[in-house]
Protein backbone atom coordinates (compact mmCIF):
# COMPACT_ATOMS: atom_id res chain seq x y z
CA UNK A 1 0.00 0.00 0.00
CA UNK A 2 1.28 3.49 -0.87
CA UNK A 3 1.15 6.42 1.52
CA UNK A 4 1.18 10.11 0.65
CA UNK A 5 4.91 10.52 1.22
CA UNK A 6 5.82 7.63 -1.11
CA UNK A 7 3.55 9.01 -3.82
CA UNK A 8 5.15 12.46 -3.37
CA UNK A 9 8.64 10.88 -3.57
CA UNK A 10 7.66 8.97 -6.72
CA UNK A 11 6.43 12.22 -8.32
CA UNK A 12 9.65 14.05 -7.42
CA UNK A 13 11.78 11.17 -8.72
CA UNK A 14 9.72 10.99 -11.93
CA UNK A 15 10.09 14.74 -12.47
CA UNK A 16 13.83 14.61 -11.82
CA UNK A 17 14.31 11.74 -14.24
CA UNK A 18 12.18 13.44 -16.91
CA UNK A 19 13.92 16.84 -16.62
CA UNK A 20 16.93 15.99 -18.84
CA UNK A 21 14.61 14.55 -21.50
CA UNK A 22 12.49 17.71 -21.44
CA UNK A 23 15.48 20.07 -21.41
CA UNK A 24 15.86 20.11 -25.17
CA UNK A 25 18.49 21.40 -27.54
CA UNK A 26 19.15 24.71 -25.81
CA UNK A 27 19.74 23.17 -22.37
CA UNK A 28 21.89 20.40 -23.87
CA UNK A 29 24.04 22.93 -25.71
CA UNK A 30 24.32 25.11 -22.59
CA UNK A 31 25.49 22.07 -20.60
CA UNK A 32 28.07 21.33 -23.29
CA UNK A 33 29.31 24.93 -23.08
CA UNK A 34 29.60 24.67 -19.27
CA UNK A 35 31.61 21.45 -19.62
CA UNK A 36 33.95 22.99 -22.19
CA UNK A 37 34.48 26.07 -20.02
CA UNK A 38 35.39 23.84 -17.04
CA UNK A 39 38.05 21.90 -19.03
CA UNK A 40 38.98 24.75 -20.03
CA UNK A 41 38.65 24.72 -23.80
CA UNK A 42 37.60 28.29 -24.56
CA UNK A 43 37.77 27.89 -28.35
CA UNK A 44 35.43 24.91 -28.33
CA UNK A 45 33.18 26.66 -25.77
CA UNK A 46 32.90 29.69 -28.03
CA UNK A 47 32.15 27.47 -31.05
CA UNK A 48 29.42 25.70 -29.04
CA UNK A 49 28.03 29.08 -27.89
CA UNK A 50 27.93 30.25 -31.51
CA UNK A 51 26.05 27.06 -32.45
CA UNK A 52 23.58 27.78 -29.65
CA UNK A 53 23.15 31.36 -30.89
CA UNK A 54 22.51 30.01 -34.41
CA UNK A 55 19.77 27.73 -33.04
CA UNK A 56 18.04 30.63 -31.30
CA UNK A 57 18.65 32.96 -34.27
CA UNK A 58 17.09 30.53 -36.75
CA UNK A 59 14.05 30.00 -34.51
CA UNK A 60 12.99 33.66 -34.58
CA UNK A 61 9.65 34.19 -36.30
CA UNK A 62 10.57 37.62 -37.66
CA UNK A 63 13.45 39.96 -38.26
CA UNK A 64 13.98 41.74 -34.95
CA UNK A 65 15.56 45.14 -34.46
CA UNK A 66 17.99 45.63 -31.57
CA UNK A 67 17.96 49.38 -31.95
CA UNK A 68 17.22 52.15 -34.39
CA UNK A 69 18.75 55.61 -34.13
CA UNK A 70 18.57 58.86 -36.07
CA UNK A 71 22.20 59.60 -37.00
CA UNK A 72 24.31 62.45 -38.33
CA UNK A 73 26.00 60.33 -41.02
CA UNK A 74 25.92 56.72 -42.24
CA UNK A 75 27.54 54.33 -39.76
CA UNK A 76 31.09 53.29 -40.54
CA UNK A 77 30.35 49.79 -39.19
CA UNK A 78 28.23 47.89 -36.69
CA UNK A 79 27.83 50.08 -33.61
CA UNK A 80 30.02 52.80 -35.13
CA UNK A 81 27.55 55.65 -35.46
CA UNK A 82 26.94 59.19 -34.20
CA UNK A 83 23.42 59.80 -32.87
CA UNK A 84 21.65 62.94 -33.99
CA UNK A 85 21.03 65.48 -31.21
CA UNK A 86 17.31 65.80 -32.01
CA UNK A 87 14.57 64.67 -34.39
CA UNK A 88 14.10 68.05 -36.15
CA UNK A 89 14.85 68.43 -39.85
CA UNK A 90 14.42 71.18 -42.38
CA UNK A 91 11.99 70.26 -45.16
CA UNK A 92 13.99 68.36 -47.81
CA UNK A 93 16.93 67.59 -45.46
CA UNK A 94 18.08 63.95 -45.65
CA UNK A 95 17.01 61.74 -42.74
CA UNK A 96 19.67 59.18 -41.86
CA UNK A 97 18.75 56.14 -39.77
CA UNK A 98 20.92 53.41 -38.29
CA UNK A 99 19.29 50.08 -37.36
CA UNK A 100 20.54 46.70 -36.14
CA UNK A 101 18.40 43.82 -37.47
CA UNK A 102 18.74 40.26 -36.16
CA UNK A 103 17.22 36.85 -36.92
CA UNK A 104 17.59 37.22 -40.69
CA UNK A 105 18.45 34.37 -43.05
CA UNK A 106 21.51 33.74 -45.18
CA UNK A 107 21.73 33.10 -48.89
CA UNK A 108 24.47 31.21 -50.71
CA UNK A 109 26.42 33.63 -52.89
CA UNK A 110 28.71 30.93 -54.33
CA UNK A 111 32.38 30.16 -53.71
CA UNK A 112 31.77 29.73 -49.97
CA UNK A 113 30.16 33.15 -49.62
CA UNK A 114 27.02 34.04 -47.67
CA UNK A 115 24.65 36.88 -48.46
CA UNK A 116 22.48 39.05 -46.24
CA UNK A 117 19.85 40.97 -48.19
CA UNK A 118 16.78 43.06 -47.44
CA UNK A 119 14.20 44.86 -49.52
CA UNK A 120 13.23 48.13 -47.81
CA UNK A 121 9.71 49.59 -47.71
CA UNK A 122 8.82 52.99 -46.25
CA UNK A 123 5.49 54.20 -44.95
CA UNK A 124 5.02 57.85 -43.90
CA UNK A 125 2.27 58.52 -41.36
CA UNK A 126 0.97 61.23 -39.09
CA UNK A 127 1.43 60.67 -35.36
CA UNK A 128 -2.26 59.72 -35.28
CA UNK A 129 -1.53 56.84 -37.69
CA UNK A 130 -2.97 58.31 -40.91
CA UNK A 131 -0.98 56.92 -43.84
CA UNK A 132 0.28 59.73 -46.08
CA UNK A 133 2.37 57.64 -48.43
CA UNK A 134 3.82 54.18 -49.00
CA UNK A 135 6.96 53.39 -50.97
CA UNK A 136 7.53 49.64 -51.46
CA UNK A 137 10.94 48.44 -52.63
CA UNK A 138 12.42 51.85 -51.96
CA UNK A 139 15.91 50.45 -51.42
CA UNK A 140 17.91 47.27 -51.06
CA UNK A 141 20.48 46.48 -48.35
CA UNK A 142 23.05 43.77 -49.03
CA UNK A 143 26.23 42.27 -47.63
CA UNK A 144 28.32 39.36 -48.90
CA UNK A 145 30.76 37.64 -46.55
CA UNK A 146 32.64 34.42 -46.00
CA UNK A 147 31.11 34.30 -42.51
CA UNK A 148 27.47 34.23 -41.40
CA UNK A 149 27.67 37.67 -39.85
CA UNK A 150 25.32 38.32 -36.94
CA UNK A 151 26.28 41.99 -36.88
CA UNK A 152 24.62 43.85 -39.74
CA UNK A 153 24.00 47.57 -39.78
CA UNK A 154 21.21 49.00 -41.86
CA UNK A 155 22.17 52.48 -43.07
CA UNK A 156 19.10 54.20 -44.48
CA UNK A 157 18.73 57.68 -45.94
CA UNK A 158 15.31 59.14 -46.72
CA UNK A 159 14.64 62.51 -48.34
CA UNK A 160 11.02 63.61 -48.24
CA UNK A 161 10.42 66.59 -50.49
CA UNK A 162 7.22 68.58 -50.38
CA UNK A 163 6.24 67.50 -46.88
CA UNK A 164 4.73 70.36 -44.87
CA UNK A 165 6.20 71.20 -41.44
CA UNK A 166 4.96 68.90 -38.66
CA UNK A 167 5.67 65.63 -36.85
CA UNK A 168 5.66 62.38 -38.82
CA UNK A 169 6.21 58.69 -38.20
CA UNK A 170 8.52 56.92 -40.63
CA UNK A 171 7.79 53.20 -40.61
CA UNK A 172 10.52 51.10 -42.20
CA UNK A 173 9.94 47.48 -43.14
CA UNK A 174 12.88 45.17 -43.84
CA UNK A 175 11.85 42.15 -45.93
CA UNK A 176 14.49 39.43 -45.73
CA UNK A 177 15.36 38.22 -49.23
CA UNK A 178 16.79 34.96 -47.83
CA UNK A 179 13.76 33.91 -45.77
CA UNK A 180 10.10 34.80 -45.30
CA UNK A 181 10.90 36.93 -42.24
CA UNK A 182 9.95 40.59 -42.04
CA UNK A 183 10.83 43.26 -39.48
CA UNK A 184 9.36 46.71 -38.93
CA UNK A 185 10.48 49.71 -36.89
CA UNK A 186 9.45 53.34 -36.53
CA UNK A 187 11.20 56.67 -36.15
CA UNK A 188 9.46 59.95 -35.34
CA UNK A 189 10.77 63.08 -37.06
CA UNK A 190 9.67 66.70 -37.12
CA UNK A 191 9.96 68.93 -40.16
CA UNK A 192 10.52 72.62 -39.46
CA UNK A 193 10.87 75.59 -41.79
Image (tube, rainbow, N blue to C red):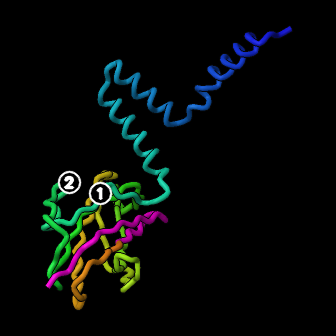
Q: Gap in Å between the C-alphas at discs 2 and 1?
A: 10 Å
Q: Residue at x 21, y 82 (%)?
A: 159
Q: Which residue lies under the disc numbered 1?
A: 67
Q: Quadrant of residue 17?
A: top right
Looking at the rendering, the stretch of residues picked out in magenta corresponds to: 172-193
Q: Position of residue 14 (x, y in %)?
A: 69, 20
Element type at mark 2: loop
Dot 2 alpha-carbon crowd within 10 angstroms: few under 14, some 14 to 19, many 20 or more: few
Q: Quadrant of residue 143?
A: bottom left
Left or right: 106 as drawn, with respect to 1: left
Q: Which residue lies under the disc numbered 2?
A: 79
Q: Nearer the viewer, residue 28 or 157?
A: 157
Q: Give the vertical position of 129 relative to 154 (above or below).
A: below
Q: Earlier in the sequence, mark 2 or mark 1?
A: 1
- Outermost bottom residue: 162
Q: Quadrant of the C terminus?
A: bottom left
Q: Position of residue 51 (x, y in %)?
A: 41, 40
Q: Position of residue 172 (x, y in %)?
A: 35, 71
Left or right: 169 as drawn, with respect to 60: left
Most common SS among magenta residues: strand
- Outermost right residue: 1
Q: Residue at x 46, y 63 (%)?
A: 181
Q: Give the vertical position of 109 relative to 9 (above or below).
A: below
Q: Residue at x 40, y 43 (%)?
A: 53
Q: Residue at x 34, y 23 (%)?
A: 37
Looking at the rendered image, the disc whose residue lies closer to the viewer, 2 or 1, is 1
Q: Position of residue 157 (x, y in %)?
A: 22, 74
Any magenta on residue 191? yes
Dot 1 alpha-carbon crowd within 10 angstroms: few under 14, some 14 to 19, many 20 or more: few
Q: Give the vertical position of 52 relative to 184 (above or below).
A: above
Amino acid sequence: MFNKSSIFFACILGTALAAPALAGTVADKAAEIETLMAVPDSGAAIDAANALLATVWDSTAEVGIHQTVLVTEPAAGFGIYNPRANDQYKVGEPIMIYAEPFGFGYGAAGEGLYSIAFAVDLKVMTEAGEVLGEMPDLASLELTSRYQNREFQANLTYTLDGVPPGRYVLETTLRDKNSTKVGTFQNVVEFVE
